Image: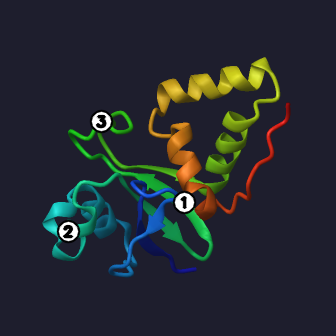
């Protein structure tokens, strides 16, 4: 099964998939996300934006948080980090309505090791993850 890679701009709420090349390999998409100002088609509208890379085999199946060097929007890591869409859905649900202290503790432990996935970023990705509006209990 072949995949297509697109940039997801998190400066919009909800996030938008950018129009641009339909990459068949992740490396050029990650490079564009890391240095958007180096790409004429991307620089004007998204040169300073928080960009992720989405891997699509329709639907979205995986998301990459690239290493943006000095970008402190989401913490720092030394290389691109991929995470499966289903894990992001689970994390979103767990952060929205934790079932109990054990789940809340697990989410907090994950946040210490993967600070990229803040609730705000997950909320903006919600439509791309296939998550409908979640009703809050209470």
How many numbered markers are drawn?
3
Q: Position of residue 94 (x, y in %)?
A: 71, 36
Name the residue rendered at 33%, 37% in the picture.
Answer: 77
Coloring basis for residues: rainbow
In the drawing, does residue 43 fall left or right of residue 27? left
Task: First in sequence, mark 1 or 2: give its number.
Answer: 2
Where residue 44 is drawn, which disc sits there?
Answer: 2
Q: CA distance from mark 2 to mark 3?
A: 21 Å
At 32% from the left and 61% from the top, the residue drawn is: 30
Residue 114, position as x, y percentages in the image: 48, 34
59 w.r.t. 131: above or below: below
Q: Which quadrant holds residue 130? A: bottom right
Query: Residue 104, labelled with which disc?
Result: none
**Left or right: residue 76 compared with residue 40:** right
Identify the image quadrant of the N terminus. bottom right
Q: Residues within 10 Å of mark 3 (few under 14, many from 20)?
A: few
Disc 2 is placed on an element classified as helix
Q: Reading the chain from its start, which is encountered first: label 1 or label 3?
A: 1
Secondary structure beneath dot 3 equals loop
Q: Position of residue 86 (x, y in %)?
A: 67, 53
Q: Is residue 45 left or right of residue 56?
A: left
**Label 1 SS:** strand
Image-quadrant location for residue 75: top left
Measuring 56% from the left and 47% from the top, which residue is drawn there?
122
Front position in the image: 135 or 52:
135
Image position, residue 125 (x, y; %): 55, 55
The residue that appears at 26% across and 67% down in the rendered structure is: 45
- Mark seen at residue 72: 3
Please tell me the numbered disc located at residue 62: 1
């Amino acid at each position: 099964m072949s995949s297509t890679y697109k940039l997801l701009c998190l400066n919009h709420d909800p996030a938008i998939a950018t129009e641009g090349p339909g990459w068949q390999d992740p490396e050029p998409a990650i490079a564009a996300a890391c240095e958007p100002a180096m790409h004429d088609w991307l620089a004007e509208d998204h040169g300073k934006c928080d960009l992720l890379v989405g891997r699509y085999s329709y639907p979205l199946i995986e998301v990459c948080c690239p290493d943006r060097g000095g970008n402190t929007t989401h913490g720092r890591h030394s290389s691109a980090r991929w995470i499966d869409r289903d894990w992001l859905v689970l994390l979103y649900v767990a952060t929205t309505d934790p079932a109990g202290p054990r789940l809340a503790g697990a989410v907090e432990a994950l946040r210490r090791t993967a600070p990229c996935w803040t609730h705000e970023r997950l909320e903006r990705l919600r439509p791309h993850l296939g998550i409908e509006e979640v009703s809050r209990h209470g």
